[in-house]
Amino acid sequence: MNDSRNDATIGIIGGSGLYQMDGLTVLDERKIETPFGDPSDAYVIGEIDGVRVAFLSRHGRGHRLSPSELNYRANIFGFKLLGAHTILSASAVGSMKEEYAPTDIVFPHQFIDRTRHRPDTFFGNGLVAHVGFADPICTGLSSAMSAAARAAGARVHDGGIYICMEGPQFSTRAESNLYRSWGADVIGMTNLQEAKLSREAEICYATMALVTDYDCWHEAHDDVTVETVLAYLAKNAETAQKILRSSIVPAATRTRDCPCASALRYAIITQKAAIPENVKMHLAPIIGKYL
């Protein structure tokens, strides 16, 4: 396992091309080994406006990994090893409401889990911990990203519910209408596990959801296709990169007085003497300060 802490304070998870944004000075590419296996790709370490950042292509460069194949634990653990205290996420989503149109940007504050096949905790194997997750997004970080989005001229929606489905298939029409009846605002396939694991790692996490389609519920619009998603992502790419860049300094300099920073303080249930030594060693970057 690599221990590369203090290489970057801000992590960014997104698609291919984010490491090429204007103003980024690339310093290194780092392959990280974790107790949970390999992350999606090498982390691109760079500097923007005086802040050290680490970029990770969520699906691997070339988009090689499906949402169900992603090693979410390794991805987030890698950021922890690099020293990141904050993660900015960007992803494509479908809209579940008429007022959220393609190219709009949503900053959801809640999740509903419809996944089935994904490890989504660092704990187990002799160590039990239960973190609070009532408010799964770091609202201070989300507000900073939202302000950057408005300054960039984007049409922005703050708050709302992101329903995280398993995929890789898109929804059936029946499912899409069911999720609308639950009050969901957007639908995607990746962000919930990132948010859960970031909270366990005491990393602030917020996501910028880029609307690309109306899923399949909207009678006046075509059903979602990969072609539609990619077309709107390309249209929004410049704005998305501008928002991420403008969010970095506020994210790096904000006071972390949020629950994210101490999520594990009262979460570990297992008595210290009962925790297996190999688990203590593997999870030291996360739990070390509490042992």
Image: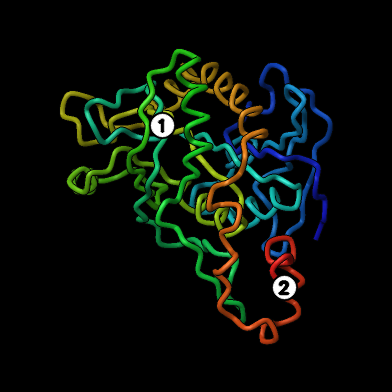
Residue 211 vertical position relative to residue 43 in the rendered view, above or below: above
Residue 102's spot in the image, x, y percent?
A: 34, 23
| Quadrant housing residue 252 | top right
Q: Label 1, secondary structure: give it.
A: helix
As drawn, the label of residue 291 is 2
Name the spot of residue 220 as percent of width and height, x first.
Answer: 17, 24
Is residue 203 shown above or below 50?
A: below
Please name the residue that numbered disc 1 is placed on. Answer: 226
Q: How many marks?
A: 2
Please give the name of the residue rendered at 43% of the width and 29% of the height, measured from the top-left corner.
Answer: 210
Q: Nearer the viewer, residue 122 or 102?
A: 122
Earlier residue among tags 1 and 2: 1
- Left or right: where 211 falls relative to 259: left
Q: Quadrant of the N terminus?
A: bottom right
Residue type indicated by callout 2? Leu
SS assignment at label 2: loop
Residue appearing at x 47%, y 32% in the figure: 143
**Disc 1/disc 2 C-alpha distance (Å):** 47 Å
Q: Badge 1, how many Cα within 10 Å: few under 14, some, many 20+?
A: few
